[in-house]
Structure formats: C-alpha cells, structure tokens
Image (spheres, rainbow, N blue to C red):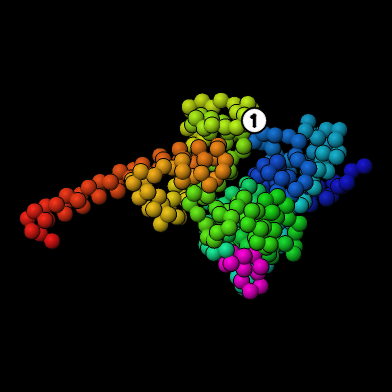
Amino acid sequence: MAKFTGSEWDEIRKKFRHSIMADTSLISLAQNLDTKEWPHEGEEEKPSKYIDFTYDELLMLPEIAGRTDRADHLMGILKETLAFDDPFGEMVAQVEVSSAKENPILKTLSRLSIPEDFPLMLANFSEGTRIVCAAEDVKTIGGFANLGQQMSTRVVLGGDFRHALNALTHGDEEGICQFLPYRKGSTGLHLAEAIGLVAAGIPRPEQLALAKYYGAKLNPSDAASVKAMTKDQAEKQANSLRATVAAALEWFKEEKESLVKSLSEGASLDRYFVGINDAARESIAVHLTASLVKATKVAVASSSSETKKRGFFARLFGRG
C-alpha cells in the first residue's frame, strides 16, 4: 500500500519547483538525510527530473513502474529536504542575535581558537551540506554554527551536517579534524591540514588513482584495488583541486610565507605533509602545493639575490 497519496505528491512537487535543491543529485540529498540511498545513478537523477509529472505519470516511469515503494522513497526524500527550506524565513533574524554565550558550538570554536570567519569553501563538506548553507548565504564556520543551532530545533539533520554539529557541540577534536584543518591536541587551524582536506573531498577511489599517478607508495590493499589514471584524467582532477589549494594558501598567508622560507632553506614538502598520515592524500598535497609555490619560491629567491647585490654595491661605494 502506498505511503503517500497523489494529493501529497502534488503538494510536494509544487513546493519543490521553488527549492534551491531542485537540481541537486538525489543521491546527495538522500545521503545528507541519512536515509536509504536513491537506487538510480546519473547526472539526470535530480528532483527536477520528476516534479513535472503527475502522480499517475510518476508511477509509470521506467525508474518507478511497479514499485510504489520507490515512489514513496522519492517523495520521502523530497519532503524531508523541503524541511530545510521552511524554517529559513525567520531564521536569519535569530542567527544575528545568537551569541557565544548562548551557542555551545561557538564556545568550542573560541576554546580551540578556531576563527569564526574561516571560509566553508575550505571545509570538507558534502554537496548537500554546501547547498543548505548556500541557501542561507552562510559562508563561514561561525555562520554554520549559528545556522546549525537554529536548524537543530526544527528539522531532522543528517549526514556530515549533523556529524559536524555534534563534533563542534561536544568538542570532539577527532571529529572536528574530519571537516576542518584542525590538528588534534593543538589549537587553531593549519595550512598543511587544510591542503590535506582538499584531497579528502573527492571519492576515495579517485584519491588513490591520482596518488598512484603521482607515484605514491600505497599499502597493499589500496595498491591492489586502485585503477590507473591517464595523464588527461589526472590533469583534469588536479585542476579541479588546485583552485581550492590556492585559496588555502591565500587564507593561511603567514604559514605560506613560513613554508616558502623553509623550502628555500632546503626543507621538503614530503616532510611538511607527513602529519596527514595518509599516503595517498600526502602525495596529492605535495604535488598540488609544489606547482603553486614554485613561482613564489623563484620570486623570493630573486628578491633575496637583488637585496644581496644592492647590499654589496652599497658597501663598495659607501652608499646606505
């Protein structure tokens, strides 16, 4: 027996036409709700593919025909997703009046010296969580903390959104390390971990394939299952990650300067990223960073050389 009726489907699809998540992968939406996976893959598997059909037409689609339980599953995903949209109207004003005294998540950020203005684009979040935050123009970890506190009283949260909020609420440092460049046992955020999280944001098979292309020494289990990656595939994947690495280098300016100085003095990127403790992600971090700091190193070296020349001639001709 069907769980949802035709009239409920009409209401759901009417509301979803105005949802920012209409063109989001159904697989991502299901994952973010911590519900059963949507069984069909493909770029076209989005709510927008289905919401133009009536209930009777929906039941005749090849993906659903003869499976009212699958129709119910689709409607369940869409209905739960809509819950993210509904409370947002009045939430903005409430977020603005939230304070660290009222918000345990902000207290954790303060205690661990995690800056509230740290950009979410550098956090390791799923597509679903990013879309929820984008819907409310939330761009920082502080904004995420306030948004999460308000949402937690109104909707059932799932996926990495819920895990991140739980970790921050309870000060779970190991959990925080999964989505922020935090170093367990220390305070603040760090460049090496930030670049390490960039690679963590892609599926594990792609991490291993790219690392293998770069010549990483993988453990026997990973090495046995990893697929080869062509040069074109590797460059395409690397280019998609490089922009985020560049953004991390820009955010952590002081650490970047220290890194460039260390490299000019003979230090290695391999050693710099050893704390990531994952051979595949370390290899990716090394190669992506090397391509971006190379020009900076050359500029620093050139500047240093020019300074030495000026100093020499100044002494030679008695000029200060």
Give percent across and percent down for residue 169. 67, 63
Identified at 49% across, 41% down, the residue is: 285
Instruction: Tell me if residue 4 can be seen.
Output: yes
Q: Is residue 122 left or right of residue 269?
A: right
Give percent across and percent down for residue 36. 78, 43
Quadrant location, the C terminus: bottom left
Quadrant location, the N terminus: top right
Residue in front for this viewpoint, 31 or 52: 31
Give the vertical position of 140 relative to 79 (above or below): below
Q: Residues within 10 Å of mark 1 (few under 14, many from 20)?
A: few
The outermost residue toward the right is 1
Q: Quadrant of residue 173?
A: bottom right
Give the vertical position of 76 relative to 137 (above or below): above
SS majority, magenta: helix
Q: Quadrant of residue 95?
A: bottom right
Asked whether 108 falls inside the magenta stretch, the response is: yes
Q: Secondary structure at mark 1?
A: helix
Asked whether 152 falls inside the magenta stretch, the response is: no
Residue range corresponding to the magenta coloring: 100-111
Give percent across and percent down for residue 192. 49, 49
Identified at 54% across, 31% down, the residue is: 217
Residue in front for this viewpoint, 87 or 17: 87
Identified at 53% across, 47% down, the residue is: 275
Q: Is residue 35 left or right of residue 253?
A: right
Residue in front for this viewpoint, 278 or 160: 278
Give percent across and percent down for residue 15. 73, 53
Instruction: Tell me if residue 242 can be seen.
Output: no
* Total count of labels: 1
Three-letter code, disc 1:
Ser
Identified at 45% across, 38% down, the residue is: 287
The outermost residue toward the left is 317
Task: Give the residue pinned by disc 1.
Answer: 221
